Image (tube, grey):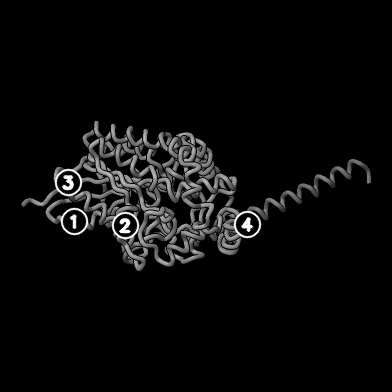
Amino acid sequence: MNTANKIERFFKNFGLFAFTICLLLAVLEVGSSLVLYLYGINPNKYEYNQILSGYHVFKNTPGAPLWNEVKKNPDDPPSIVDRNGFVSDNPIFEKKPDDVIRIFVMGGSAVFGVGQFPPFASVHPYHLGNLSYSLGLAGQLESYLSAQRPGLKFEVINAAATDRMLHQSMIYYQETISRFSPDIIINLDGYNDLHYGIMSGRPYAEMEARIPNYVTLLDEVRLYKPKFMTVLNLLYNRYFRNYVGEQLKKQFYLRDDMDQEKYSIAQYRKYEDSFTGSSQRFLQILDHYMAVLHSDKVDFIFAIQPMLYRQINKEWSKIENQMRREVFGVGPNLSNDAIDRFILMSKYFFDEYLSKASQERVEKSGFRFLDLNQEIRHLKSDFELYIDYCHFTVDGSRTVAEILGKEVLKRFPVDS
């Protein structure tokens, strides 16, 4: 066979091979499209519940339903994030009716109504999905206020977001909420600020560092994704994800005893001055936030959210105590010293310094302060408040809502 024939045969075989591969991919793509169509799955849907924002790194995705929503009644309509990032039981219009008392509740995932963080299910499983508006903190607060003062018309709006910190709430207020004529802003904060901002003393920089992650999420939606890759991803989620997740948990989560000597108050004292110094930026942001609210003549309740690891706390149940002692979330790249400092800060720093320092600033500004770990000390061990390090049971949401509701009603005394 001469060279020309060899070359001709090569290109012929290569063309046939390429054609066969393209045909197989086309058949696979058409078949995958049919599978996705039959199951009602949109492969180009943005799967995360937060979108990139130039103002505060992320905000809730407009139009997104709550993930795996836990409802009071199965037939209840789904809770939807509106175009402003709010969750409520009725549409929220920019112009507030004159007879409505409008309250925005802000903070992180505990306020938003997120379910249990998976590693804690090894102690006791609770709901994983988000609580509906009516079962979550904002809805429970609206129900409590309406029951206590039926002559008043309250509108309570969930304006929280997973991972949100205090400085993001301030900017979100300036960007969006201030246009809606709020009467009262309630912030429940603490854990996210501790985790992402107070440890470093640089909360803005901490959030800026996460921008590329959200850009990647957004780019994944804009790019065409082959349907068969979506089908493979579905198969992975169904048959392999739990196993892989269990292996990752072993890397990402420390199982330890929180009551051992290396986490004692004596060890905390070694880091106390450093912790106090790194928290000054958080307190400065609190001052900035209150100055903005003063300028708008908006009332403010600043509450430190309940946290399982704090020493001042409710009387822990058997489940809560086991979770507190055995499960603690840490990043995989933290040094042992960084892990120890974070645990010590979680246990003692609010009790020893930050709660009092925040209270002094808030009350000096003429606003109201609640340390909810102090407010829940009366709760006994037969009451389950926590489902993990800071998220609430349904009953826990109602209890926290009632504590906040009593503080709100001090502004509206009953006529004697």
Callout 2 secondary element: loop
Q: Which residue is situated farthest in the right direction here?
A: 1
Among numbered discs 3 and 1, the one appearing first in the sequence? 1
Say what amino acid the circle numbered 2 marks.
Answer: Ile
Callout 3 secondary element: loop
Residue 5 in view in this figure: yes
Residue 159 in view in this figure: no
Callout 4 secondary element: helix
**Which disc, if any, is residue 376?**
2
Among numbered discs 1 and 4, the one appearing first in the sequence? 4
Crowd class of label 1 (few under 14; some 14 to 19; many from 20; radius 10 Å):
some
Residue at the spot of label 4:
28
Among numbered discs 2 and 3, the one appearing first in the sequence? 2
Say what amino acid the circle numbered 4 marks.
Answer: Leu
Among numbered discs 1 and 2, the one appearing first in the sequence? 1
Give the number of marks.
4
Residue at the spot of label 1:
146
Q: Residue at x 26, y 52 (%)?
A: 404
Between 379 and 89, the one nearer to me in the picture: 379
395 is higher (above) or lower (below) than 276? below
Residue at the spot of label 3:
411
Give the distance between the C-alpha atoms of the residues marked 1 and 4, in whole angstroms: 56 Å
Between 148 and 151, the one nearer to me in the picture: 148
Between 271 and 137, the one nearer to me in the picture: 271
